[in-house]
Image: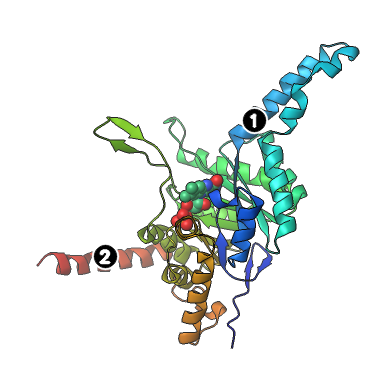
Amino acid sequence: MAIDLSTRYLGLDLRCPVVASAGPLQQSVDGITALADGGVGAVVMYSLFEEEVRRESARLQNLGDLHADSYAEALSYFPDLPSVEEGVTKHYLNLIERGAAAVDVPIIGSINGATRGGWVDTARRMQDAGAAAIELNIYMVPGDMSVSGPEIDDRHLEIALSVKESVSVPVAVKLSPYFSSVGHVAAALDRAGVDGLVLFNRFLQPDIDIERVTVVPGVTLSHPDDARLPRTWIATLRGRLRASLAATSGVETPDDVIKYVLAGADVVMTTSSLVRHGAGHAQVLIDGLAEWLERKSLTLDKARGMLAVPTGVHADEYERAGYVAALERAKQVYGR
Ligand SMILES: Cc1cc2nc3c(=O)[nH]c(=O)nc-3n(C[C@H](O)[C@H](O)[C@H](O)COP(=O)(O)O)c2cc1C
């Protein structure tokens, strides 16, 4: 009997819980089609960045000012205008439109920023282009030491609310794990009506090349150990929020998908494994999950959250008890 992997995420019906997270394979319609053919339940687009949107608006504004100062007969001398219209945003929206027409799984538009402002209107343009939902990646490095933790929390809430207000499709927020209280921020976003949380953003942490004595920036592909932090938080938040929970980081094999499901993820996202092995690797992940469910005589719904922190207990005391026990065990193992 075929295992039913159908999944609800952000109120959308997906054929399975494995989702292609924002990444480089989505940069063409062929890439999007390959991901859908690979079996994923949805495709999250790569991000359109606040900086790109702002730069484009500024250029359009400059051209508009130029127009305003010119005589009517001179208006035809603005060869730049069409090329601005062909900018990054237009290309992105066009890709969503063509991608959504080419595949039968939801396409989720991704906007990425750190401040409030008009740039968030781009979310509505993504919706108009055919995005079934919006993923808002709030990537903020609070390097300004005068800004307090609660101010950072509030800024997240304000940005999320302004995106929510500008669209009617569901909105997921992709968060960093670096809050003094992840649960508090998650609950505030949930109360504000955010439809899903994507845990977690990976922070760009540059390396240092000691021979060249330079900083080496760059996004690296993940390792299964990177799943431990988001998995812990998903297990903690499961059953305590109305919003969907998406896991992102460290999926390489079906085992990693299964662990996230057991922790309580509604969907499990992957970028690194698809970059490493190709879009077809999604089917390996999906088949592995189905095979495991069958072997364990479990349905997906039954397995989901089976190993989450029980809702009746104090999550902080529970986590601390686990921590103390783990350290006690580690002392036995490593102290001999
Ligand atoms: C090459 C590359 C490009 C990425 N681009 C984006 C992006 O545009 N927007 C975004 O929100 N995340 C982006 N990510 C992060 C992924 O969506 C994902 O959250 C992260 O890589 C952790 O998942 P993984 O372990 O499956 O790779 C990118 C990751 C990689 C490796």
User: In the rendered image, which quarter is residue 40 located in?
Assistant: bottom right
Mark 2 or mark 1: whose residue is earlier in sequence = 1
Q: Is residue 131 visible?
A: no
Indicate left or right for 277 with 104 as reference: left
- Neighbor class of circle 1 (other Cα within 10 Å; few <14, some 14-19, many 20+) is some
User: Residue at horizontal 55%, vertical 82%?
Assistant: 299
User: Residue at horizontal 64%, vertical 71%?
Assistant: 15
Which residue was labeled with disc 1? 54
Where residue 42 appears, as percent x and y from the top left, is 62, 62
Secondary element under disc 1, as helix, strand or loop, is: helix
Front position in the image: 333 or 205? 205
The residue under label 1 is which amino acid type?
Arg
Where residue 230 appears, as percent x and y from the top left, is 44, 59
The residue under label 2 is which amino acid type?
Val
Secondary element under disc 2, as helix, strand or loop, is: helix
Identity of the residue furthest to the right in this view: 73
User: Residue at horizontal 90%, vertical 14%?
Assistant: 72
User: In the rendered image, which quarter is residue 313 located in?
Assistant: bottom left
Q: Nearer the viewer, mark 2 or mark 1?
A: 1
Q: How many marks?
A: 2
**Disc 2 to disc 1, C-alpha distance:** 48 Å
Which residue was labeled with disc 2? 324
Q: Quadrant of the N terminus?
A: bottom right
Indicate left or right for 16 with 102 as reference: left
Q: Which mark is residue 97?
A: none
Front position in the image: 247 or 73? 73
User: Residue at horizontal 77%, vertical 15%?
Assistant: 66
